Amino acid sequence: MATIVILLSSNAMGYLEAAQDKEKEDRKKENLDLATFFIDLLAVLEEKTKGNLAEEEKMTLEKVLTELRMLYVKLSR
């Protein structure tokens, strides 16, 4: 489970970081769209595993999703 969360969150973070790149401002929307895709995949994972995760796994997934969503909102303004 942890490997999947790391993989998806790393991809989302990479696209969010790319969206911050001022030199590639023309690709900002594309990068935010790709970040959204991976954030949504994590949300699906959270929904589908509800009630089947250890408390630590659940908290990790919630924390990662919260951080990614907050960064997305900040960048999408």
Image: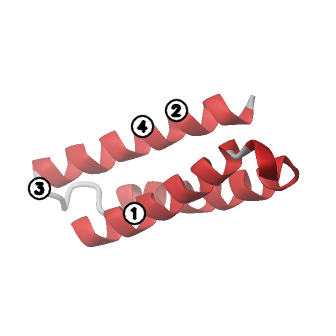
Find the residue positioned furthest to the front. 23
Amino acid, disc 1: Leu
62 or 13: which is nearer to us?
A: 13
- Where's residue 24, x and y in %? 80, 52
Q: Which residue is identified by label 4?
A: 66
10 Å crowding of disc 1: few (<14), some (14-19), many (20+): some
Q: Secondary structure at mark 3?
A: loop
Q: Secondary structure at mark 1?
A: helix
10 Å crowding of disc 2: few (<14), some (14-19), many (20+): few
Residue beneath the point at 50% across and 64% down: 11
Q: CA distance from mark 2 to mark 4?
A: 6 Å
10 Å crowding of disc 4: few (<14), some (14-19), many (20+): few
Q: Nearer the viewer, mark 4 or mark 1?
A: 4
Q: Nearer the viewer, mark 1 or mark 2?
A: 2
Q: Which residue is identified by label 1?
A: 45
State which tag comes first along the sequence, 3 or 4. Answer: 3
Q: CA distance from mark 1 to mark 3?
A: 14 Å
State which tag comes first along the sequence, 1 or 3. Answer: 1
Amino acid, disc 4: Thr
- Where's residue 46, x and y in %? 36, 56
Tell me, yes or no, whether the two marked residues, 2 and 4, touch with CB atoms within 8 Å: yes
Q: CA distance from mark 3 to mark 4?
A: 18 Å
